[in-house]
Image: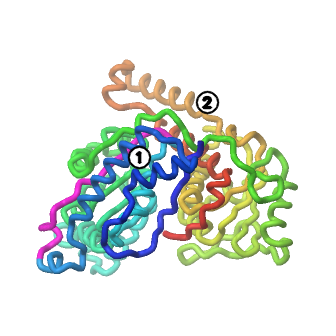
Amino acid sequence: MLHLRIPGGCPHRLSVRYLSSLISLYRDDVRKGLLVEDSRQVHLLERLEDVTSRLDAQPPPSSWFSRIFSASSVPKVKGLYVFGGVGCGKTMIMDMFYQELATTSKLRTHFHDFMLDVHERIHAFKSTLPPSHVNDRKCYDPIPVVAREIAKESRVLCFDEFQVTDVADAMILKRLFQTLFEEGVTMVATGNRPPEDLYKNGLQRSNFLPFIPMLKAHCEVLDMESIVDYRISEPKPLDIPGGRANYIQDPGQLDKIFHYLTGGAEGAVCRPVPVLGREIRVGVSVGPILSTTYRELIERSHGSSDFRALARTFSHVIIKDFPQLSIKEKTQLRRFIVMMDIFYDRNVKLIISSDVPLHDIICLQDADQKAKDELRMLMDDLKLTMEEAKSMSLFTGEDEVFSQKRALSRLTEMQCADYWDLPHNKHE
């Protein structure tokens, strides 16, 4: 049975207790046949309800208590870091928590997007400094300034896919989150690996390691221990020609769907989409419906900011001529995974015509074998035994293989009627 995703946004409300507990809402969906009860999900809900009760006990940001005392004087609320396999319900449960959370001082975002925003804020702060002071961290360190700015905006941060792969992110995480936690921010995050394995094999990882005990001190760590992917099920027919959103070598069917969704496809043009002061042009579109090809979307050097702009602009994206991807097309594969994460987070509806069945779009066997081959080459170069490699955390490709499995799982869910019922989410 498919687990429904719940949109991240919710209306602003007064800071009061909500009437139904998370577990009550969850079991209501179980009774309606929308979910299958999972003991691990129930345990996660129990831990999140505990976080909720402690957050509700805090004075709201506008109260007389908060105005008199600094943020550091307000009792801290320990958050939650949840990790587990793809499709086990981590994101769904976190979104339930976020939507039912009473405070309006909250943010739910993909961790990669959050860090991009942090770097943009750091750049903006540095641009206000005299050139001679830009690198003077003792007097003009932008990271605490940016962290306090974020803390004023959001008392609760909910991150999907907490994954550290960029050295620039890794080097600032401890200083960033140290200030966030000192300012009383509570973090709830989902990830694919335990805290000890974050930024595994990363450059200058020794500088990152102090972040791990700090994360564990401020967040309870919960392992979902699930091998079930609830996204995989036999989908109900969609309300479009053909009743489904994926076809094998049938671009003509996608033309019919484009014609149907646009009411005749009249006026379809290649229009510019603004991205950070520049423009990109992909495929043809009518209103929020885009029709394009794999070559235009994935072969070109589009980055995450481009895909975010497309996700804001288009509610439906039709992709023709999609090949099977393997580790040999590493750049295109990574670009596709980034696109999938962003489109999934924004509830973009994806319609694909591919060379192979949907579940074979990414050749995972090649990816697993490539990771093993890289490990063997590294062991040979360093003259290590397998036990020595394990003790030094020298496994390669694990994050990448997980990301590929997650992309396939999400792509499967995006074909289902329940996903198509979700409103297009344009939020940043």
Residue 102 in the image: state x and y as whole percent: 34, 68
Residue 238 in the image: state x and y as whole percent: 74, 55
**Three-letter code, disc 1:** Gly
Residue 253 in the figure: left or right of residue 297: right
**Three-letter code, disc 2:** Gln
Mark 2 surroundings: few (<14), some (14-19) or many (≥20) residues within 10 A: few
Q: Earlier in the sequence, mark 2 or mark 1?
A: 1
Image point (60%, 67%), residue name: 424
Residue 421 in the figure: left or right of residue 110: right
Residue 41 in the image: state x and y as whole percent: 42, 43
Task: Look at the image and say whether residue 74 sits in the magenta stretch.
Answer: yes
Task: Look at the image and say whether residue 302 sits in the magenta stretch.
Answer: no
Residue 110 in the figure: left or right of residue 292: left
Q: Is residue 85 above or below residue 342?
A: above
Q: Which residues are magenta?
A: 69-86
Q: Secondary structure at mark 2?
A: helix
Mark 1 surroundings: few (<14), some (14-19) or many (≥20) residues within 10 A: many
The quadrant of the image that shows the N terminus is: top right
Q: What residue would you read off at disc 2?
A: 365
Q: What residue would you read off at disc 1?
A: 191
Image point (34%, 78%), residue name: 127
Residue 286 placement: quadrant: bottom right
Looking at the picture, tell me which residue is in the foreground, 42 or 111: 42
